[in-house]
Amino acid sequence: MKLSAYKVDPEKLDSGIWWNFHTETTCDGNTPHASDPCFLVIPNISGRYVVALAEEQLPWIEQLRAAPPEDPAEREEHLSEIRTLTRRTRAEALARTTLKGWANLEDDDGKPLVWSPEAGRLMLSDRACLVYLDFVERAATNRDAAIAREEAKAAGNS
């Protein structure tokens, strides 16, 4: 196997990859779809997200690592707190390092949601929007999307 077969596209590492939320695939030409909701995601090839996640979890590390209580009610409360902390720290880390834009998202009144880093952080942190948090995380860890050969294949040049 040639080393170049799996080299990443540096432009994608810096500028991100547009992902179609409905199809869960990259957008043609790395341009948002005309109407489907799309997210601009920085690939997690370099480990930026992993480092950011560790930084976000650091203030909570003792609580995250603590053994759950034996009492069933206390145990469930403890585990619920761990789930909340995990979701919150994932959201903060993804917002800081990974989610860099969106297109074709609307509020409940049909008004376009304008992208900003703060809007992204709020959306990813909202428990009701957990499906978007999971989507962005999956997109960021899709190694094949960052490989330079994918562009050549899409253009029929492979």
Image: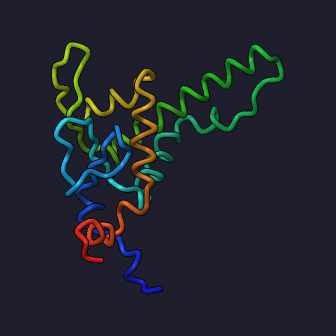
Q: Is residue 41 left or right of residue 104?
A: right
Q: Nearer the viewer, residue 40 or 153?
A: 153
**What residue appears at the point 36 percent right and 68 percent down from the top-left corner?**
147
Say if 80 sits above or below 146 in the image. above
**What residue appears at the point 42 percent right and 84 percent down from the top-left corner?**
3
Q: Nearer the viewer, residue 153 or 72?
A: 153
Say if 127 sits above or below 59 in the image. above
Q: Residue 110: x percent and y percent? A: 19, 18
**What residue appears at the point 25 percent right and 71 percent down from the top-left corner?**
156
Q: Is residue 103 left or right of residue 83?
A: left
- Find the residue positioned furthest to the front: 156
Say if 77 sits above or below 41 in the image. above
Say if 113 sits above or below 60 in the image. above
The quadrant of the picture occupied by the C terminus is: bottom left
Q: Residue 41: x percent and y percent? A: 31, 48
**What residue appears at the point 27 percent right and 40 percent down from the top-left corner?**
38
Quadrant in which residue 2 is drawn? bottom left
Q: Is residue 62 left or right of residue 51?
A: right
